[in-house]
């Protein structure tokens, strides 16, 4: 057993840490509190940050060198993400493109598609969003109805997608659409569709936080060029499923790092409120500390397994459930322990600086829904890890 | 990076499992704890002694195998809910070896061979499972005081008694010693309250004694956490097997989503405990500066986790889960013992908070 990172990995981590100290002006929570910003200008803050990361070679590090990568291991990627999260750096606007579409193109796309799309995606000259979910197809994604029909050598897309994160700021959308209405899995194909065209209408949807970070998209005979089909006709489901499984690993120690920073803030706040000595407060904080450290232990174990060449299995469902439900417990506790001050929205002058608790509290409700809801994750664990029987 | 145990330790884990399955399987546990006056199998513990198990925590050049091996063995013992004082004995052997004292060294030799049972007597207030500063005294070559919840206190051949003056060793207690059994819900963990006024040797004092006691508590917490891991691992296996077989409403109950999700939650607790326990053991060997913190984390987590998993094991068995005949209650009861001592869950939460530090 060995849970140490290699000296090279530690050196890389230190390099990243120093780079962030030099390049990140201020944590994103403070950026959000600045009255000069609105939703659009915050996207520009994030875009500028992505450009910096890209210029420093920190995006798509695990990809082949040709596509901007440096053959980095999952551990390097995880260390990078952990440092960024601990510093509360802005999330890059193209996170869905980089985590999902990039790998899809590298593994399943054509050379031409890679050349056309990857550099602009990394440089944030084009922002991508993910068009999988539909009003009638969320957890049961394969029941999606959006269809693609041939139009000469091109395709025409008709239907609706929803919960499309970053839709309002995106230039392109990758879409799962039916090329066969009867074949449940084999009738789904994977398309790249430009948003700025007559057949596409994007609308923002107001979230419980009041923002419209996600939206809905209506396709009415929208054009997808023939060479913007990824893989073969009917391969969309398989591509989407393999790509979704690549997401694992990097998150393993990222969330504990992010939560550590938030815990620091909470502990400071509790001390300032003069409550730190209370027995119930100690118990609550102690439990939050313990759970986060256990989560990091799980993450290190995942990285160790990846390093040993074991593909992350359904056990990654455990990680997903753990971080998303921990986020809810952490923010729940924070709003209890900080008193009403914790409920102040960021624009309020008396809100706490270190964490936007009010936002985090609401945002934490999303993690257990997206990326495969936690109920679906528990189904996966029961069936594929515990091998419990199916009903009749 | 690698999570798996290295070859030597994996081999030890495997051979321990085989030994336990052969000589002390779960099916024997109830009989042993019910039918023997000590609540454990003396012959099997003698066998463990011959095989060198009590010396696991000794320095490697003295035949020990380190904290990872210790954790692996304790987890295996947890899987069969092995009755008896093995954990306390292994800790006793380690503590004796850390005393720079002739009597301790002599006794240590016998204890590591399984010829003498030596345990530490450190608690004085039955309402608290975490030791306070002791009232017991060592004066003029005698130790005087009362101790409570002494593990196997009525059966021990020697006691390491915490006193204000340091660690006092009492061998073959005589007329000045009395032990009152303290039966708890766990039939296989025989505690006693002891009153003692006996000749003794002060085998460690001052800083050295404090360090040994601290280490005893930390390694005890590690061993208890590993035991908890084994208990919940087996409790989950038994439960998954049961709900896969048992039918109601014409289907195996394990196909019902509510129970599937419950089992998934149990697995999360078990696997997270595995990460936490082995990480703590690893830090004990490789990263001592984080060991106290990571051990507090592991113990606080595993205690609560095992309580949940073993409680749900009873629930998912239905009525039979509430019978003496079925096994789940054995896991729940041992969980309570291991959870309470070597730093209760609550105490470890406080420790973890106080010791919190960067670990990457
Ligand atoms: C903040 C946010 C961002 C998102 N971003 C995107 C995006 O960019 N692109 C995109 O395509 N999608 C996105 N999604 C959509 C997300 O993937 C879906 O919301 C999710 O898959 C759940 O689908 P649903 O909303 O249709 O809920 P439903 O599937 O209707 O589920 C409703 C409830 O029923 C439960 N449930 C459903 N099926 C089962 C089952 N078999 N067993 C047990 N319980 C079940 C669910 O767990 C849930 O609690 C986003 C969602 C959120 C919240």
Image (spheres, rainbow, N blue to C red):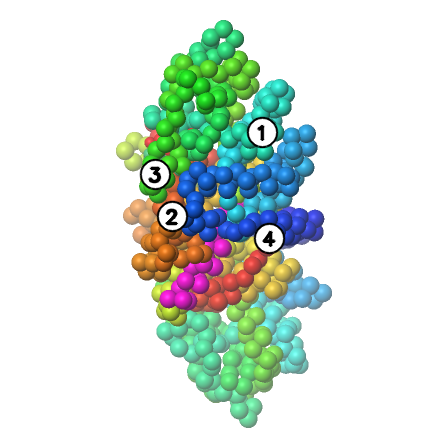
Whether callout 2 and callout 4 share a subunit is answered yes
> Is label 1 in a helix, a strand or a loop?
helix
Question: In this image, A150 relative to A106: left or right?
Answer: left
**Mark seen at residue A21:** 4
Find disc 2 in the rendering and name its residue: A359
Q: CA distance from mark 4 to mark 1?
A: 26 Å
Badge 3: chain ID: A
Badge 1: chain ID: A
Any part of residue A268 in sight: yes
> Is label 2 in a helix, a strand or a loop?
helix
**Against A164, is B264 above or below?**
below
In terms of image quarters, where does ligand 1 lie? top left
Whether callout 3 and callout 2 share a subunit is answered yes
**Mark seen at residue A207:** 3
> Is label 4 in a helix, a strand or a loop?
helix
Q: Nearer the viewer, mark 3 or mark 4?
A: 4
Cβ–Cβ below 8 Å for labels 4 and 1? no
**Against A37, is B45 above or below?**
below
Find disc 1 in the rendering and name its residue: A120
Q: CA distance from mark 3 to mark 4?
A: 33 Å
Q: CA distance from mark 1 to mark 3?
A: 29 Å
């Amino acid at each position: 057993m060995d849970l140490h990172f290699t000296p090279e990995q530690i050196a890389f981590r230190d390099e990243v840490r120093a780079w962030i100290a030099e390049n990140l002006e201020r944590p994103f929570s403070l950026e959000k509190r600045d009255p000069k910003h609105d939703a659009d200008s915050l996207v520009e803050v994030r875009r500028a940050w992505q450009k910096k990361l890209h210029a420093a070679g920190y995006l798509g590090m695990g990809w082949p060198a040709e596509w901007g990568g440096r053959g980095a291991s999952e551990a390097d990627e995880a260390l990078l993400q952990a440092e960024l999260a601990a510093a509360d750096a802005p999330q890059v606007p193209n996170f869905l493109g980089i985590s999902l579409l990039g790998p899809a193109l590298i593994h399943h796309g054509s050379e031409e598609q890679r050349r056309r799309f990857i550099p602009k995606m990394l440089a944030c000259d084009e922002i991508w969003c993910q068009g999988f979910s539909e009003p009638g197809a969320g957890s049961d994604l394969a029941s999606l109805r959006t269809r693609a029909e041939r139009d000469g050598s091109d395709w025409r897309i008709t239907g609706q997608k929803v919960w499309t994160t970053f839709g309002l700021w995106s230039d392109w959308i990758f879409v799962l659409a039916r090329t066969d209405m009867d074949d449940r899995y084999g009738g789904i194909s994977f398309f790249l569709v430009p948003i700025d065209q007559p057949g596409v209408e994007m609308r923002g949807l107001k979230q419980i936080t009041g923002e419209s970070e996600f939206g809905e998209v209506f396709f009415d005979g929208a054009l997808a060029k023939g060479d913007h089909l990824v893989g073969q006709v009917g391969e969309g489901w398989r591509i989407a499923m393999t790509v979704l499984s690549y997401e694992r690993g990097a998150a393993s120690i990222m969330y504990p790092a992010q939560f550590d920073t938030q815990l620091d803030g909470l502990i400071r706040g509790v001390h300032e409120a003069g409550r730190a000595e209370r027995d119930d407060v100690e118990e609550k904080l102690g439990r939050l500390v313990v759970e986060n450290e256990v989560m990091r232990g799980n993450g290190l174990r995942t990285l160790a397994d990846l390093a040993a060449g074991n593909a992350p299995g359904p056990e990654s469902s455990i990680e997903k459930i753990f971080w998303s439900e921990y986020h809810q417990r952490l923010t729940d506790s924070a709003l209890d322990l900080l008193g009403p001050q914790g409920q102040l929205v960021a624009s309020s002058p008396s809100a706490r600086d270190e964490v936007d608790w009010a936002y985090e509290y609401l945002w934490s409700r999303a993690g257990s829904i997206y990326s495969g809801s936690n109920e679906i994750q528990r189904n996966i664990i029961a069936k594929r890890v515990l091998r419990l029987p199916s009903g009749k | 990076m690698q999570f798996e145990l290295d070859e030597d330790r994996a081999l030890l884990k495997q051979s321990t499992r085989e030994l336990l399955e052969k000589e002390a399987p779960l099916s024997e546990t109830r009989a042993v704890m019910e039918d023997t006056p000590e609540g454990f199998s003396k012959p099997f513990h003698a066998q463990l002694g011959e095989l060198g198990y009590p010396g696991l925590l000794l320095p490697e050049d003295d035949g020990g195998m380190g904290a990872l091996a210790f954790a692996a063995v304790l987890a295996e013992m947890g899987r069969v809910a092995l009755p008896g004082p093995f954990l306390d004995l292994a800790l006793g052997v380690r503590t004796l070896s850390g005393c720079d004292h002739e009597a301790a060294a002599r006794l240590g030799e016998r204890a590591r061979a399984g010829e003498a049972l030596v345990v530490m007597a450190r608690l004085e207030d039955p309402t608290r499972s975490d030791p306070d500063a002791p009232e017991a005294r060592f004066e003029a070559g005698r130790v005087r005081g009362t101790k409570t919840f002494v593990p196997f206190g009525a059966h021990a051949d020697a006691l390491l008694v915490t006193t204000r003056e340091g660690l006092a060793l009492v061998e073959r207690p005589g007329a000045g010693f009395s032990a009152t059994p303290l039966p708890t819900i766990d039939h296989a963990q025989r505690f006693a309250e002891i009153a003692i006024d006996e000749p003794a040797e002060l085998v460690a004092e001052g800083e050295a004694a404090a360090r040994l006691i601290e280490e005893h508590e930390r390694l005890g917490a590690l061993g208890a956490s590993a035991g908890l891991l084994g208990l919940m691992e087996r409790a989950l296996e038994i439960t998954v097997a049961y709900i896969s077989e048992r039918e109601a409403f014409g289907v195996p109950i394990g196909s019902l989503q509510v129970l599937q999700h419950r089992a998934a939650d149990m697995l999360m607790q078990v696997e997270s405990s595995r990460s936490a326990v082995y990480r703590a053991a690893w830090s004990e060997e490789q990263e001592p500066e984080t060991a106290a913190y990571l051990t507090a984390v592991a113990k606080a987590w595993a205690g609560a986790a095992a309580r949940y998993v073993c409680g749900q094991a009873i629930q998912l068995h239905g009525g039979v889960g509430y019978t003496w005949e079925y096994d789940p209650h054995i896991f729940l009861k041992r969980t309570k013992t291991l959870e309470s001592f070597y730093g209760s869950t609550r105490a470890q939460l406080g420790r973890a908070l106080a010791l919190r530090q960067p670990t990457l």
